[in-house]
Amino acid sequence: MTLDSEHPSPNPTNGHQAPNGPPGEGSAATRRAVLVGGGALAALTVLPVGAAPALASLADSPSPTHGPMAGKGTPSMSFITTKDGAQIFYKDWGPKTAQPVVFHHGWPLTADDWDNQMMFFLGQGYRVIAHDRRGHGRSSQTDTGNEMDTYAADVIALAAALDLKGAVHIGHSTGGGEVAHYVARAEKGRVSKAVLVGAVPPVMVKSDKNPGGLPMEVFDGFRAQLVANRAQFYRDIPAGPFYGFNRPGAKVSEGVIDNWWRQGMMGGIKAHYDCIKAFSETDFTEDLKKIDVPVLIMHGDDDQIVPIADSALLSAKLVKNGTLKVYKGFPHGMATTHADTINADLLAFIKA
């Protein structure tokens, strides 16, 4: 096991703060910006008829090889259909003969949260893949199956449909739990390496077995705020603790906040509600012990959503072949706020 704390802190404060609720409401200016953006989208619906062909050409894409539109010659997004009928949206870019790098997003986001990494690794010659977890983004808004066993089964189905071999699976937050649960069950030869970024394993919630975890009241608060006002809740999280924008001297990006909100609001509230239990109460201890491929565990020591002491530091002790990298002062969403650093370290691990 290797411990690396070489990366400097961008902020003067690097203490821990449990996610006991949103730090404040989004600004009125930001809400106006969202409304203006919505007005711009609405304007597209009243463009002159002559503008339609130009817009249509922007949507041209190859027909999918899986999903309801397969083989029908009509431009469409790519999906697989699971055994229970859920449709899972995925992106699959780059040479099909190249090594696959598969990205697993956090709650309540989508494959779009990996845009920076997808473009980076595509430029490095890899085949890059990311999916919207069921109930999230463009996938089916399921009211059942929103738990880790089914999430892992969906990834098994995706890996089989795309015939992925020797893939590197990278998961952030809840996606890190999904990676652990999947890799522990994956068919031999499907996975070569795994990466957990600000990930929830081994287990988040406090219990007799996990005295350092977060109290159940924290997650009950998440559920209550989700039901009461999901739209505002999904502004407060990224505007505050997710990206460390609540820290003194933080460089706040309204675009990043808006993009988080956009992704969250694409999904289904029932699935997002259920997923809180999945990411907070699932115990990944045995999954971590079963994984025999190299694992890179990356975590910011100022992660306010998944505190490092009860996650990465424990996971590193459970995997057989793990490397731990601790990033001083980095927040939960460090793959966005510090993409250049994270991408370089991911690439080095993959190439090693």
Image (spheres, grey):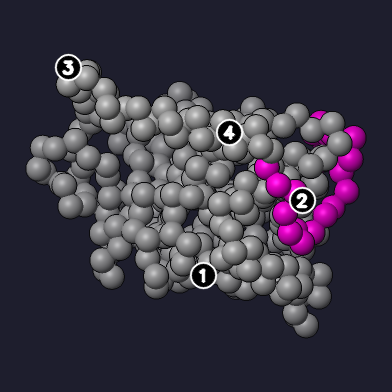
Distance Cα–Cα, label 1 vs label 4: 31 Å
For label 3, the SS is helix
Query: Which residue does the image show at 82% across and 40% down from the upper left?
Result: 247
Mark 2–mark 3 distance (CA, rounded to whole Å):
48 Å
In the rendered image, the vertical position of residue 1 relative to residue 218, given as above or below: above
Res 266 label = none
Of badges 4 and 2, the one in the foreground is 4
Say which label, 4 or 2, has the lower sequence index.
2
Q: Badge 4 is on which residue? A: 32
Q: Main secondary structure of the magenta part?
A: loop
* Residues marked 1 and 4 touching at CB (< 8 Å): no
Judging by the rendered image, the residue that carries numbered circle 3 is: 50
- Amino acid tagged 1: Asp
Dot 3 or dot 4, earlier in sequence: 4
**What is the three-letter code of the residue carrying label 2?**
Pro
* Residue at image point 86% right, 36% down: 248
Where in the figure is residue 274, as x and y percent of width and height? Answer: 51, 70
Give how far apart the Cα atoms at labels 2 and 1 are.
Answer: 23 Å
State the residue in front, 47 or 137.
47
Say which residue label 2 marks.
Answer: 23
Residue plotted at (76% across, 68% down)? 214
